[in-house]
Image: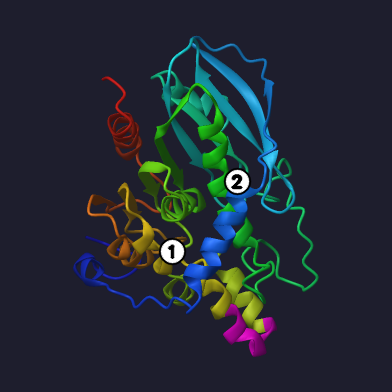
Amino acid sequence: MPSIDLPLEELRDYAPSSYPPADLDQYWSATVEAALTQPLGTVLEPHELELRGVEIFEVGFDGFEGGHIAGWYMRPEGGGSFPGVVVYHGYSGRAPRPLELYTLAAQGVAVLSIDCRGQNGRSTDGVSRDEGYVAGWMTQGIRSPAEYYYRYVYADAVRALEVLASFPEVDEGRIAVTGVSQGGGLALVAAALSERPVFAWADVPYLCDFRRAVEVVDKRPYTEITDFLRAHPGLENDVWNTLSYVDLLNLADRVSCSVVVSVALWDDVCPPSTIFGVFRNIGSTEKALRIMPYHRHETSYDVNAERLLALLEALGVPG
């Protein structure tokens, strides 16, 4: 099969070495504890779009240690205990909106989508970072693991699960996560850092195996890292130290729920070797890799259909 990266046979054997910092466990246990103890500050506002069988809300909650996270919440009409799904979005994108959430909600699932802080104007960051960075979000605060942008995004992803679980109509024991690209990476992050997800489906995930990514691709967002290093070559050790705390290569072994990951062999944004490497490290005993041999940074109709059915099955929604 063709590939923008290694041949498929080599991808299956690709086993990059993880490089976790010595205090990785302490770093994330302290961050997650702070994220879980901080009040959510959730606000729901009804949204004026009438779709049969569902109720739609604009949702907002407090971002981790500052800022405001906006999104959408759709739940089935009537009482009951509904399973739930949190949907994360791609880099510089936006939370899936009501029409994009309707397919799941119409099957009896409560669905929450959130905007990443600062990426599209609806959610705000609220964290002051004095040091400079290149355009984008990959290098904001990259001089310090404590101030790094994605520490806050990962914590927000965990808090989103708590928001969904806090709704009285949601069965907190039946919650799944999903997303594409950055959203796929965040789905894996949520499964790694929170005990709430019972299932994760991550499509062409970003935030995987940074060292390999910057060797293979010449497109944003990964090139934000190399752009920064060209401007600040003396900070190379600091950069890789910070990235080691958020690289899914170092966090994947924490994922214990059932998980499906899709990968496209012609993906020139999130190269397949980075995804194969992270998939190999996933700690779950129930994991599957869905290979799209002729696609780029995208998903196919068939994969979208498989994702829907897999989510419903994992959440116990009758067919």
Please provide percent x and percent y for residue 246: 51, 66
Give residue 163's position: percent from left, percent from top: 57, 36
Q: CA separation, marks 1 and 2?
A: 20 Å
Q: Name the residue at 43% across, 62% down.
A: 268
**The image quarter in which residue 224 lies:** bottom right
In the shown orientation, is residue 108 left or right of residue 228? left
- What residue type is disc 2 on? Gly
Can I make out residue 216 in this image?
yes
Of 219 and 203, which appears nearest the observer?
203
Quarter holding residue 209:
bottom left
**Residue 93, numbered circle:** 2
Residue 300 vs 191, above or below: the answer is above
User: Which type of secondary structure does the marked residue at label 1 adopt?
Assistant: helix
Please tell me whether residue 72 is drawn above or below residue 130 in the rendered image: above
Q: Residue at x 33, y 50 (%)?
A: 262
Mark 2 closeness class: few <14, some 14–19, many ≥20 residues within 10 Å: some
Q: Which residue is label 1 attached to?
A: 248
What span is colored magenta in the figure?
231-239
Find residue 176 and report its horizontal and vertical position in percent: 40, 38
